[in-house]
Each structure stands twice: as structure tokens, then as C-alpha cells.
Image (spheres, rainbow, N blue to C red):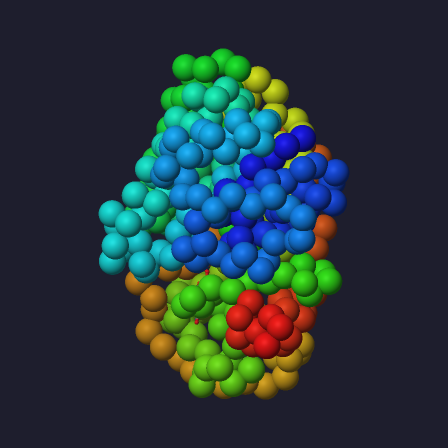
């Protein structure tokens, strides 16, 4: 299958490209390179440098590469930034998705796998989070994705031949098993990369954002899913997208780890690093973890790489050898 991967040079998109190749598909990589890294693409994969908001150029690319399915990862994903610059998020994420749908409609591409997020749920009172849990985002990032989901449902309702799956990610972690590609965000704000960068001396310390949450050890609990499991779910879901499908699945491992637990496991992998206590980070719900059983029942996907230690080890393999991210390549 010819699959267009938007945001193909980002952390998750680049892992998806490799997963598609492995599964025998033909990925076509698209990125505007505003935050992505061209170096993350394997040699020989066709690359289209394009902003998805350029609907005409996007439609041309869909035609030119005879695209049969799109995996849509292109988006900004910093909660804090979305609070400071909401319009940038609605423009890039929501308008970007609208433009993509317009191009798909024009060309007649009928399959879309959409990168959504548990941030669309906001702060649910009960755990685990099911797909039916009410979606009440608490930041513009979550809203920008929820509006996109809404557009998918409305468009699909008007177009019976169209099929989509919205996959709601929990905390994505880890890097490719062979250490070839990884995570390179600027700035980096995610817990596991922050820990690894601290160990590498790129940061002075890890600050735990709040130790007074209503959880067992007072720190926030999250559901960490390995990026390679996550992208495999996309490939498996794409294979079952029949006309009219409107699928929504959580992607997590179904259990949570606290910030302190992550720090302890990381210490057992990489040794000591400095940790400090800080105030809560605004917008952080105390506990988020998924019920991801629906995708297992429907599609047969189940996370394989659930060992948190191995997840951190796989991330460390990348960070240790790329302390400056992709900039270190060939340096
Ligand atoms: N966190 C922390 N210190 C950091 C970065 C993150 O204590 O330097 C906490 C954060 O408050 C959250 C958890 O680690 O409870 C995971 O945060 P991350 O930014 O990795 O992902 P998020 O859950 O925000 O998507």
C-alpha cells in the first residue's frame, strides 16, 4: 500500500516510516521540516517537503504518489506552548487537518489514520480511561486534536466510502531497537528524555513537578507506551480500515508509573543523576492511564514492549550516542 506519512521526520512519524517499510508497504514521507529531522528518514524513501496547509500542493502530492492511505502525524505537541500560543496550535494542528481532509476529498483518498491524544480527555475523574470517557480537554493542544477528531467524524458521516481511525496516545517513550532513530525535540520537556539529558550533563538536574498529588507517592502517574508498539498499531489498524469505518482507540499499556518510579527505574539503568523537587506544572492531571483493550479486541494489537526498564534502555541507546540529537550525525 502507498502510504503518505505526514510529519514523517518527527519522533513518531520517523518510526512509522520504518515500521511501514518492514511491513512491506511503500511509505512516502512528507514534512515541512519546521521541527522534523530529514536525517531520520531511511535512504530511498520518497520525501516531499511540504506544509499540509498548502492544500493544492498536498493534493498534487497525493495524486503523484498514488496514495491509498494517509498516516497523519504532522502537528505541534507541547501543552505549555499551546497555552501561550493557542492560535499557532489551531492553525497548525486543526487547520492543517482540515486542509489534509480537503486534499483527500479532492483526490479521493479514502483511508486516514490520525494521531490523536489522551489530552483530549482532559482530567477524567475515573481511571482507567476508556474510549467512551468524556472528552473535556484542559488546554488548546487537546482542543486542537479534539476539533480534528470532530472533523473526521463529520466528514466520514458525509462520505460513506471514507474510513478513519483516531488513535489516542498516552505517553510515548523509547526509541528504535537498533538505536538508529530516536527522539530529538527542541526544547525537550518530556520526563524520560529530560532524565537522560541530565545524565549526559546537558542539564543540571531533573525537577519533579509536584510531590503532593493524590497518588501513592505524591507524584503524577502516566501510561508509557513504546514508540515501536505505537507505530505497529497504526500499521495494523490501517490494514483493517474498511469503507465507512470510524474507529477510535486508546494506545497505552494499561498501567501507570509515577514520576518517582520512572526516576528509580532510570537510576537502575543509567546510574545516579541529580533530582530536585519543584512545584506542580500547570495543567498536569494527577493520574492518566488507558484501558487499551478495545484495539486488542477489534484489531488484535497488544503492546509487546511493556517493560518500563527496557523502554528506558532503548531510549538511552539513542541518547547516549546522540547527545546533540540528529545534529551529531556525521559530526
Ligand atoms: N515531569 C516532571 N519533570 C520533568 C518533566 C516531566 O516531573 O522535567 C512529569 C510531568 O509533570 C508528568 C510526567 O512527568 O507528570 C510526564 O510528563 P511528560 O512531559 O513526559 O509527558 P505528559 O504527561 O506531559 O504528556
Q: Is residue 29 above or below residue 149?
A: below
Q: Is residue 186 above or below residue 153?
A: below
Percent across and percent down for residue 243 are: 57, 17
The picture quadrant where one finds residue 144 is top left
Percent across and percent down for residue 238 are: 62, 32
User: Could you tell me which quadrant the C terminus lies in?
Assistant: bottom right
Using the image as rendered, state which of residue 218 and residue 194 is in the foreground. 194
Residue found at x 46% / y 82%: 203
**Could you tell me if residue 54 is visible in this image?**
yes
Residue found at x 46% / y 26%: 104
The picture quadrant where one finds residue 306 is bottom right
Residue found at x 53% / y 22%: 110
User: Could you tell me which quadrant the N terminus lies in?
Assistant: top right
**Could you tell me if residue 302 is visible in this image?**
no
Using the image as rendered, state which of residue 220 and residue 315 is in the foreground. 315
The reply, left or right, for residue 81 in relation to residue 220 is: left
Percent across and percent down for residue 244 are: 53, 17
Residue found at x 54% / y 48%: 8
Which quarter is ligand 1 in? bottom left
Percent across and percent down for residue 220 are: 45, 63
The reply, left or right, for residue 241 in relation to residue 202 is: right
Amino acid at each position: 500500500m502507498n502510504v503518505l506519512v505526514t510529519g514523517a521526520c518527527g519522533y513518531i512519524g520517523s518510526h512509522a516510516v520504518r515500521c511501514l517499510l518492514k511491513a512491506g508497504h511503500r511509505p512516502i514521507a512528507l514534512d515541512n521540516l519546521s521541527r522534523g529531522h530529514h536525517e531520520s528518514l531511511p535512504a530511498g524513501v520518497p520525501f516531499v517537503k511540504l506544509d499540509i496547509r498548502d492544500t493544492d500542493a498536498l493534493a498534487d502530492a497525493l495524486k503523484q504518489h498514488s496514495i491509498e492511505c494517509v498516516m497523519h502525524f504532522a502537528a505541534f505537541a507541547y501543552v505549555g506552548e499551546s497555552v501561550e500560543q493557542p492560535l499557532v496550535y489551531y492553525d497548525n494542528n486543526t487547520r492543517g487537518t482540515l486542509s489534509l481532509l480537503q486534499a483527500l476529498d479532492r483526490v479521493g483518498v479514502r483511508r486516514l489514520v490520525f494521531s490523536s491524544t489522551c489530552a483530549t480527555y482532559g482530567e477524567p475523574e475515573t481511571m482507567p480511561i476508556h474510549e467512551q470517557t468524556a472528552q473535556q480537554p484542559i488546554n488548546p493542544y487537546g482542543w486542537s486534536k479534539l476539533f480534528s477528531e470532530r472533523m473526521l467524524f463529520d466528514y466520514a458521516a458525509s462520505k460513506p466510502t471514507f474510513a478513519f481511525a483516531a488513535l489516542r496516545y498516552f505517553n510515548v517513550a523509547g526509541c528504535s531497537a537498533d538505536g538508529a532513530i530516536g527522539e530529538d525535540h527542541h526544547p525537550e520537556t518530556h520526563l524520560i528524555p529530560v532524565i537522560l539529558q541530565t545524565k549526559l550533563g546537558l542539564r543540571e538536574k531533573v525537577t519533579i513537578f509536584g510531590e503532593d498529588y493524590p497518588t501513592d507517592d505524591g507524584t503524577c502517574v502516566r501510561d508509557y507506551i513504546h514508540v515501536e508498539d505505537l507505530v505497529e498499531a497504526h500499521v495494523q489498524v490501517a490494514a483493517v480500515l474498511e469503507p465507512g469505518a470510524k474507529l477510535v482507540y486508546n494506545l497505552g499499556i494499561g498501567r501507570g508509573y509515577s514520576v518517582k518510579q520512572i526516576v528509580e527505574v532510570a537510576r537502575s539503568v543509567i546510574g545516579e543523576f541529580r533530582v530536585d523537587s519543584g512545584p506542580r506544572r500547570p495543567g498536569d492531571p494527577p493520574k492518566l492511564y488507558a484501558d487499551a483493550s478495545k484495539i486488542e479486541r477489534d484489531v488484535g494489537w497488544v503492546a509487546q514492549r511493556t517493560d518500563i526498564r527496557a523502554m528506558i534502555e532503548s531510549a538511552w541507546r539513542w541518547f547516549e550516542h546522540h547527545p546533540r540529537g540528529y545534529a551529531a550525525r556525521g559530526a
